[in-house]
Amino acid sequence: MLIEISIANYRSFSKEVTLSLEVESRLSERDKSVDERNIAETQHGKLLRVAGIYGANASGKTNFVRGLAELRWLVLDSAREGQSGDTLPAVPFRLDQNAASEPSEVEVVYTEGDQQFRYGAAFTREKITREWLFVRPAGADHPEELWFDRTEDHYETGDGWERDRGNEKKTRPEALHISVAAAWDHEQATKILRWFRNLRVINNLNTQSLTDTTRLLRDAKHQQRLRDLIRQLDFGIDDIQLRPISDESLKIQGKLQALASALGEELGVRIQQRSHELKTVHRGVEFALADESAGTRKAISLAGPLLEALATGDPVIIDEFDSRLHTHLAKQLIQLFQDPAVNRRNAQLVFTSHDTNLLTHTLLRRDQLWFTEKSRKTQASDLYSLAELRFPDGKRVRNDARYGTDYLQGRYGAIPFFGNLQAILGESQTDEG
């Protein structure tokens, strides 16, 4: 399970911020069923099944998700896709001259079996400046054990790490050592890479989410559950089918593939070849997915990753989770992760949202609600939870507060301030006249 995500000096984040999925032990909800639905009892302690991030537009929500996605990409692909001299996805905070010359950093803490891992990397556009991996057995009383700590091409290793100096020499400045070692069948590195592969990060409804849905339709183990879920979403869809794509689409795909081969190295263009496409069925009549509404397409795209996460117990991170979804549907999807009968493997959902109907003490605890806010002075993003928040009188947010209403009234920060738009537009129209 996921315990923490930390990001520093990446896009709008200057100083390190951390989203924690550890239960805040001093908190207790009046409705004890809220605790029961949201807390997973594990050998690593009490962890949360769901967390939501709120904030104004351009406050940092998407940047936080993107930072995690960049680390995942580096772990999975920096060994096999990179070339010497490739540019890395570091985007330091540019409004501070000192930060602009420093590396971006991303770190995750998670559990796998009876071990807890803390893995992270710091990187500039040109190279990996540091990469680290620490491990400890289950239980908070056990100290961390160093597996390796790499500073550029220098490695410090612990007794528990199966050191391979050959893999160290094969690790280019632009590649993560964990990625290179896994490519050469290093057992411990492969275990780390597998966790990152199973981590689902969905931002901008990337094509991978729809690919996951398509793949599950081919899987005899999951296809019926997927069909049942989509039927239940009240879109009037009776079935969903995979059909071979048309000859015309194949020709277009071939031309795009040729173009991607020509431009791919310079621009990073990738075209995913498809042999089949999804068709929805309404009362026996098939429709192309493009004929469905944007909300329906999004729900179908999310159905695969969510269903698979619930089946495997892996975490899924979704940016703009509620976009195009009715608030009742968004709530229902969250409740799938809260239901122990459905979520038997303790899968986790972390989402960003603007839907204040989900900001309620009957659905989520205070330590599950997070906010991003930009400093008016520095323009740097901050991340904090409702559990951390203190009012000017020193009091904390009560467990029976109206979270959604209080948030919109500005009591928790993280809301936009527009000024007088009417006055601005009125003046401009007067000037034009």
Image (cartoon, grey):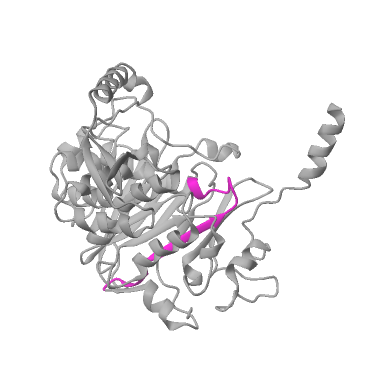
Choose top left, top right, bottom left or bottom right for residue 37: bottom left
Quadrant holding the N terminus: bottom left
Choose top left, top right, bottom left or bottom right for residue 354: bottom right
- Which stretch is magenta? 43-62
Picture coordinates of residue 313 (x, y %)? Answer: 26, 61
Picture coordinates of residue 178 (x, y %)? Answer: 24, 44
Return the residue nearer the eye: 218 or 242. Answer: 242
Q: Please name the residue shown 51% across and 61% down the image.
A: 370
**Residue 35 located left or right of residue 375:** left
Return the residue nearer the eye: 294 or 13. Answer: 294
Where 82 falls versus 46 (above or below)?
above
Does 15 appear in magenta?
Answer: no
Q: How many marks?
A: 0
Whether residue 146 is visible to the viewer of this picture, yes or no, is: no
Whether residue 298 is visible to the viewer of this picture, yes or no, is: yes
Q: Please name the residue shown 46% across and 57% down the image.
A: 18
Return the residue nearer the eye: 223 or 68. Answer: 223
**Residue 62 located left or right of residue 97:** left
Choose top left, top right, bottom left or bottom right for residue 244: top left
